[in-house]
Amino acid sequence: MSDNNYIVSKEILRERRNKNIKKHLTIFVFLLPGLALFISILIAPIAVSLYRSTFDWNGFSEGTFIGIANYVELFTNGSIKFITSLKNAMIIAIFSVFIQLPISLALALLLGRKPKGEKVFLSIFFMPVLISTVVIGQLWLKIYNPDYGLLNRFLDFVHLSQYKHVWVGEIGTALGSIVVPTIWQYIGYHMLLMYAGVKGVSVDLREAAMLDGATKWQVDKYIVIPIIKPILKVSVIFAVTGSLKTYDLVRILTEGGPFQSTEVPSTLLENMLFLRNRYGMGSTITVMLIALCFAFALLISAAFKEKDK
Amino acid sequence: MEMKRLVSTVLAGVMAFSLVACGESASTAPATDSGDAAPAAEAEAEAEAPAEAEAEAPAAESAASGEPITLKMWCIATESDSNRHAYEAAIADMQAKYPEITLEWEAFENQSYKTKIKAAVSANEMPDIFFTWSCAFLGDFVEAGKVYCLDAAYENYKSELPEVMLGNTTYDGKHYGVPLTMNIVGLFANMDLLKEAGYEEIPGTYEEFIKCCDALKAKGIIPFGCAGKETWCVTEYLESVIEKSAGADALNDIFLGRETWDNADVGAAVDTFQKLVKDGYFDPSGIGLTNDEVKNNFMAGKYAFYMNGTWNCADFANNAEFFPKVKVSEFPVINADKAKLGQLIGGPSDTLAVAASSPNAERAADYTFELGKLICHYGYLDGCGLPAWTPYGDTSSVNELTQAVAEICSNADTYVLFGDTAMDADSANTYLSYVDQVYGCQVDGEAFIKGLAKDIR
Amino acid sequence: MKFKKSLAYILLGIWALVNLFPIYFMFTFSLKSNDEIFGKNIIGIPKDWLWSNYVSALKTGNMALYFANSLLVTTLAIAISLMAALMATYAITRIPSRLNKYTNAFFMLGLTIPLQASIVPVYVVLSKLHWLNKYSTLIVPYSAFALSMAILICTGFMVDIPIDLDEAARIDGCGLFGTFFKIILPLTKPAFSTVGIYSYLQCWNEFMFANVFISDSKHRTLPVGIKALSGAYTTDWGPIGAALVIATFPTLIVYVFLSRKIQDSFIAGAVKG
């Protein structure tokens, strides 16, 4: 009797184990395409970069191990401009968070009040997001052109010629010339994200608050904004990590100039690889970039958590 | 007739330079780089020319004809490039002569091509034939074993292509490149504007030159146009100033890594250059422009002077309205104790090379030589530069500006190759970065030489 | 009150203008000659409608080919990432396992990893495999980078499907695969357009990979094509304008007709993610 029992339970166990194996096998099969893509294109390359960042390596030869020398040179070599590039990325991030996102939020809140033509405005505001950054860069290049550009000619037209600049060519204005289209293009993106949140706030809640005598502004401030906080967090993370990744507009508007004052980490990375044949150093910049992106993402998440308390 | 003589003297001048240019990667570098070498070089070139050329020619014919193949070529002769026509004409000729060889060619914009070709080399994805700059640029690829050695194919073309012209593409005694044209940095001047300031000729001394700039400024004319968006354009000015202050030999030694950058003469020269910038001789809006835009401005009469490669002669000659106004000259000597006239920046740099990975490398090599000869021929006729190959046919149609350049070269003493070509990629970009900073007045001469001495590895 | 309201309209109106003007400017200068652009008529309607600029852009600039390339690369990248994401999400959300939490977190790393991170090693590997200058050279990395966002969105949609459905299907004799294809896929259809839009935004505009990995003009995508064309026509604005219009207007026209649906899909992503 007890023997029998033992056999039965063993069979159940085996069956369960088989089932378990089968289940995990299925899971694995379902995950396979995603994992294969993800690991081969993202995770493995990062591991390789981490390894290669300790080499003096030109891409074709074997390379020599040099420890952290690349990391040291990144900060000490006067021609690499890594610190400038970080500073620029930070400035773009600051403008994104403190200028771009507030504008997006304001637009989202305004549209959330159901003005006439809400949908039309929404459609128009989202348009720049759909346009390729390269197109936007070319377009703004025509706006900034020192001789024939719209901006300078507008200044002439309103008799403010003294404010004319070589917008993308002067140290004082070049970075600004990159920041403006960057911010402009993605206001619509964040606006639509936030608008989604604003629309998610129930009408009853709004009306109840209005009945209690709250102004529209108070409703927005005390009810809507706290509710859409998770979306705001996502927007801030995207804006900051996006700023660290800036590349297209710099390549097209300034090529990192004048005098390398508008280099960003990505343009430096490209220079290392293709102008200087320094793949090891390129890997070093990559590692720094990833580390920064993660650090900021964690920091921002922590900041939002802190506020919640 | 006169032209021919001029050219042969040009070649001799180049010889002196070629010996020093890239040789150093091959054992010890010969230090003879003064004008003394020139006569010897001329003699040598002439002596070598007839030897064994005739005998080899038929062999080339037979090697070239064979089963149909397709060759791929990359170059930088984009629609807006002054060499475009020369390439098109040469390729058309080649296609007619070798119908069994299909050439698929593509042109890329200069700056992005540098990226592209390096990427392709490290990936072993090179086209069969590729455009390259000589010296260090090609040297990196040769060192990595990615370039096909052209010694065998060269035997067939010895009579038409003087060996001295291969100096910049010779590594460890082996030839790896087919030179096309050679160019120097010229001081182009818009004589209409100079006349407005009361000058009939381009001033010959530095003091007068500066006075001329001041006079131009007083008339509201901008003396120099320079594309700040492309740093190599700044080096066209800066290198001339350094060479005419510290001397050609000093600059050559530094570019080739025989001496350190920490050289007080160079520092002083950089300060001289920076003074030109600070005194407002340069168009401030040039910082944000590309070279094409600056060149157009110059042709439109916005600047009095434009220092750039002599390949521009072609574009100037093609602009009927502008051409009568433009003259070319050599940058004046700044410090007569160290430098003298005849010390020029430039040399043969535009080169075609064959990929070692090409499945048809042998036939591609012959094809490249013939193609190079034709591109050189048409390019010279168009005024894109002086020929690296011995000119043939009727060259009387060559524009006067190019002839003036040939005249300058015939009096050449020493050539120093463009810095960013002479140095390896990493050093060249470190150098360009510092040049940029000098142009932006972010570092002075002292910081420039100290910084480069520290950062060039 | 009324003043405040009109102020709001003024602000919205100004911002609408700021968004529309560049598009108008682009369209008009694409039809002008340099004389008009550099002369008096900077922002007006073109006097002579120079359609020849479009001929230049299409002929010399090859814009039609680049457009087709972009379309092909983007569509396939979206399709691949969507399929991979749906499968992965299914495994994560609907097959109970202790590892699910970690798998999900692992995929979410991708949201913060910059595209640039993998350019060096991927480049070296692709080149060793002779895998440059093909459509797949771009499609594979693009789908990998779109994956994390796609999984995030799909998760939002999939958790809304009641688990009872799976169990019912299981009782009917469907295996895990059967359930996925017969029950889950049809029910997550609304996610397709949402994932599609987010991935489109990522892939259509991508410039760095396209610039580095593709060197022959046959496989160039729009952004690289425009950069190349603008290098060739630095001083001739008309053809550049035409190229910009060709690159932009088809998308904008589709958007005008489907804006409602596109916005709703985008919003769905924000809410579910």
Image: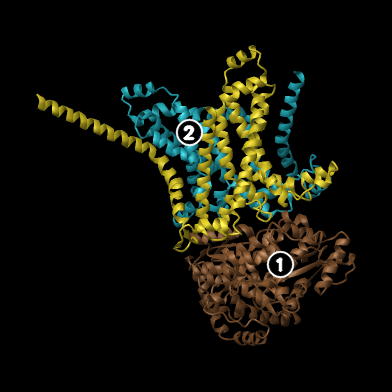
Up the image or down, C154 lies above or below A281; here it is: above
Is A272 situated left or right of A150 in this image? left
Nearest-to-viewer mark from 1 and 2: 1
Disc 2: which residue: C152
Q: Quadrant of residue B12?
A: bottom right
Q: What residue is shown at x 63% (from left), y 47% (from top)?
A: A88
Query: Tag 2: residue type?
Result: Leu
- Along the viewing direction, whichever of B177 and B70 lies nearer the viewer: B177
Chain to which mark 1 belongs: B
- Residue C109 on image: x %, y %: 46, 40
Residue A119, picture quadrant: top right
* Label 1: which secondary element: helix
In this picture, residue A80 sits left or right of residue C181: right
Query: Are discs 1 and 2 less than 8 Å apart at CB?
Result: no
Res C165 visible: yes
Residue shown at 48% from the left, 55% from the top:
A53
At a point 61% along the width and 17% down the height, the residue shown is: A206
Q: Quadrant of the N terminus of chain B?
A: bottom right
Residue visible at 70% across and 53% down?
A: C233
Tell me if A82 is positioned left or right of C83 in this view. Answer: right
Q: Chain C, which colour?
A: cyan
B345 is higher (above) or lower (below) than A293: below
Question: How far apart, in angstroms, are the residues tagged by discs 1 and 2?
Answer: 57 Å
Q: In the rendering, what colour is chain A?
A: yellow
Which quarter of the image is occupied by the C terminus of chain B?
bottom right
Look at the image and give the colour of chain B: brown
Which residue is labeled 1 in the image?
B270
Callout 2: residue from which chain?
C
